[in-house]
Image: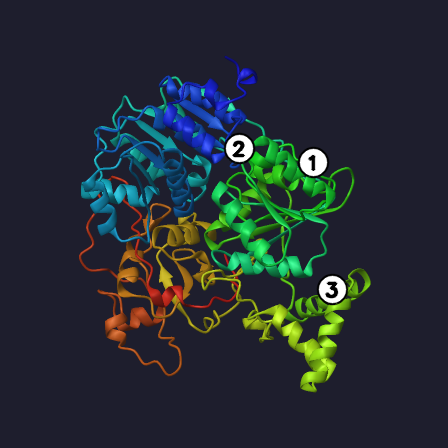
Amino acid sequence: MTTDTVTAFNQLALKNPILKALDELGYETPSPIQAETIPLLLEGRDVLGQAQTGTGKTAAFALPILSNLDLKQKDPQVLVLAPTRELAIQVAEAFQKYARHLKGFHVLPVYGGQDYRGQIHALKRGVHVVVGTPGRVMDHMRRGTLQLNGLNALVLDEADEMLRMGFIDDVEWVLEQTPSDRQIALFSATMPQQVRRIAARHLNDPVQITIKMKTTTAETIRQRFWPVSGVHKLDALTRILEAEHFDAMLVFVRTKTSTVELAEKLEARGYASAALNGDIPQAQRERTIQQLKKGKVDILVATDVAARGLDVARISHVINYDIPYDAEAYVHRIGRTGRAGKKGDAILFVAPREKRLLGTIEKTTRQKIDRMELPSTELVNDKRIAKFKQRITDTLAEDDAGLFTQLIEQYQQEHNVPGIEIAAALARLLQGDAPFLLQHKPQHKADKSRDKGDTPLRKKPARKKGERPAGKRSSPDEGMQTFRIEVGKNHKVMPGNIVGAIANEAGLDSQHIGRINIYDDYSLIDLPDGMPRAVFNDLKKVRVGGKQLNISLAGEERKAGKPTNRAKDRKPGKSANAAKHGKPGKPAGRAKSKGKPRSKSEAKPGKSIKKKARKKRSVVA
């Protein structure tokens, strides 16, 4: 069967529980990478796939792997290596979603910044699939808490990204510890020489698959995003509905249940809304679309499958209430507007943990998505007042208010109340308990549509090529502290290597990492003040360019008014003079390496670090 003839998932030899889950999720037609990869992995072949993120490759390896699982075996049968914790979580959630009808199935994501005890407990209980970052997987293997003797399949997801972040040696070490007869699927957007070398060394007669994306979006569509998540999404959507001028709107969500829930909430707010999902009978779906075309419905809340082929000229806005997991779905969604040369608007809601998906969409569509300005309080209030006045005008023009006019005259005579006060009381009665106007708040607190963690997506400042520090290094920003790490230009490290190692292996968000100055044998880096001792100790063990960071305080700078015990904070084995001037010391009790690759240790992020506000980072190499 060629990929051209595969038009539905039920044409592939997937187990019935998997097909049932796909049907419920609204998956109908396999993407090219899925159509080519699934049959090969079901047969047990090794696969070398070159495909961009957004082509649906997660399902391409997860679906056949789930079909081949032995649910009675509790030891890990599948290991998926991912470069970042965000991707590891995303892949683990995808496995859980596709396996919703596989009774007793367990998947476990393992990554830095998460407590070991919970992961160890889950591994002891038994899991079928482990999805993790290389450093944490290596740690579990060395501890003996992750046994791979029964491993049947191993997936390397985004291998080129792992190479870029300096994890490729760790990946090779993991591969060498796995059974020789395990199946391997390696996926990479590009195929650099080191990735090809790993494929040639560890894959057994692989079938190579190359998928070229044709992801483009119409120039007539204005694309914007807004960082918001959770329960605040509805508030943000309501504000957009009040301020944006739209004819008809299509709102995309992930699940069938969400279509009904959101449509009902919008109806309660006075918007003509309807749900559209795969469970709704075809006849009713067609009636709903006709109502949208005729203007009886203004907002359609739909899943991807229900909106396939939807072509309604009225649709001026597409809202991605739930961000799609792949760029192809995004392009398909926003393509419902801006048709036939007309202008359209596409707005994407992005939760903090979905920033990476936003970057993927921008990369694969080759278009920048600008952050939108949420309508101000004044603008929303002006719109509400204008709408209220218009309703009065329309009612006076269209309705016969004779009876109500008599009733108001009678009430006015009986109670001797001015007509304007009666009208105000009736308006208050109509409004109910909900406030009519938004309360004005200071600009920095105006938008409560974000969770505490919904920080703006920050742009990294551009770094001039060849830029060098001039003279003495300036003091760190407020709330930051300068540290010394024992890697530099002689070790061929770049700022991205340092940021990637610390952010992904020690549990620090990259936005909490400040300036980096790279010298010949060492580097200086600004990190949040008040770093917990556990995080500090684990950072010492992180390796970049094959060398431990061996982090230490670079000087005596402290935030004014916060005295500290320098002897307690100082690195063991380093003299006071050495600590003051940032000179390398000899750490006590350091074990000698025996030649085996060592793990990039990962630490649990401290609460004090998570709460630090970061200014823009200027990286100096």
Q: Mark 1 points at which residue?
A: 311
The answer for how far apart the CA atoms under marks 2 and 3 are is 48 Å
Which is closer to the viewer, label 2 or label 1? 1
Q: Earlier in the sequence, mark 2 or mark 3?
A: 2
Q: Name the residue under label 2.
A: 55
Badge 2 element:
loop
Which is closer to the viewer, label 2 or label 3? 3
Residue 587: image quadrant is bottom left
Q: Can residue 474 be seen in this view?
A: yes
Badge 3 element:
helix
Residue 285: image quadrant is top right
Q: Is residue 25 left or right of residue 532?
A: right
Give, as a three-letter code, the residue at label 2: Thr
The answer for how far apart the CA atoms under marks 3 and 1 are is 31 Å
Badge 1 element:
loop
Q: Mark 3 points at which residue?
A: 391
Image location (x, y in percent) of residue 40: 42, 19
